[in-house]
Image (tube, helix red, strand yellow):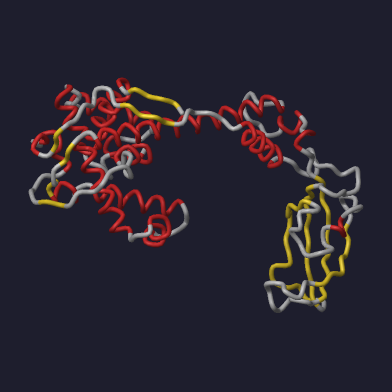
Amino acid sequence: MKKRILSGLALLASVCVLAGCGTGDETNGELKSMAVDKYVTLGDYGSLSVAVPSAKVDPDQCEQLLYAVYLSNITEENGGITDRPVAEGDTVIIDYEGKRDGVAFQGGTASGAELTIGSGGFIEGFEAGLVGVTPGETVELDLTFPEGYRNAELAGQPVTFTVTVHYICPAADNMEDSVVAALEIPEVETVEALRQFVYDYLMESAVENYQYMLRNAVMEQLINSSQIEELPETFVDSYKHMFIESVTNMAAANGMDAETFSNSNFGMSSEDYARVSAQVQARQEILLQAIANREGLNVEDEELEEKLAEYAEEMNVTVEEMLETFSRDEYRNYFMSEKVMDFLLERANVTEE
């Protein structure tokens, strides 16, 4: 729920040229009652023209994902090939341990590693040494690291790899229904059913991306056709906590702190990210509020409470829990923005590229 609301509150935060800050004491909590016409001159928003790529699935991407999902469930007992020797081009699952002078060296040991024979992923002789090995067998490979190897301690050194081949992965054109059934995906028990499942997943993602780009394009056209004066500093700053929350959550999801994540992904501190994003968000919402006022699309108290209750029930939380991060007025602004965007999208002239 928080992710859904937050993404809405941060609606299309990369599409407009930023304005400087002004003076005043308004905040986003007062957006509905602000004299927005003081800051906004609306252009012709009734039939905005935009062009966006159509939502479609790349057949090759679908087949690649299908095969990846299939392989994720392959084991020695379930679909793995164990009744013939390894051949050039096979993908095998192996355990290996490398030793120099009888001592294991760092980075030379792995379990359940995937290796395609002939890919050149290991030093010369490693992959060739597995050709002809039958799954279940263990072999020792006496090899030498190349002189220019990146690890200077191993460069030019003789080593011994002990390798156990567990099984050979089936090729993409040799997938079996029994393996798919073991995935235990509801109503997916055959390769064809899994292919449709993967296609539907990719199409859903494509549609979501299409909707995002469409909304982005409409907002950009709205901004380009309108004029926005310098906004009150307090109004802009009142959006900052949304983006502090956003970057903190994104960082945590990636196992990082907010500063590291923000600098790595946005090239700026989390404070600067929040400030810049707040400026963008303030401009967008004041535009949408101006349209809401003109078209009668505001969210009144009764509708706000109904929507809060609906969302709370959908996500199995209480309204009070929803209000721990964002205020009622911030939710009101979000729901208003959604109504106005729907209004604009219904009337937009859309060309699919």
Query: Residue at position x 56%, y 30% from top?
Result: 57
Locate residue 121: give its quadrant: bottom right
Q: Quadrant of the N terminus?
A: top left
Residue 151 against residue 240 in the figure, above or below? below
Viewer-proximal residue among 255 and 318: 255
* In-image side of 20 versus 93 (left or right): left
The location of residue 316, given as percent across then percent down, is 38, 33
Locate residue 43: give its quadrant: top left
The location of residue 349, given as percent across then percent down, is 34, 22
* In-image side of 23 versus 147 (left or right): left
The location of residue 122, given as percent across then percent down, is 76, 61
The location of residue 272, given as percent across then percent down, is 28, 58
Viewer-proximal residue among 208 and 226: 226
Residue 160 against residue 345 in the figure, above or below? below
Locate residue 182: give its quadrant: top right
Viewer-proximal residue among 223 and 96: 223
Query: Residue at position x 33%, y 61% from top?
Result: 269
Viewer-proximal residue among 19 and 243: 19
Residue 192 against residue 144 in the figure, above or below? above
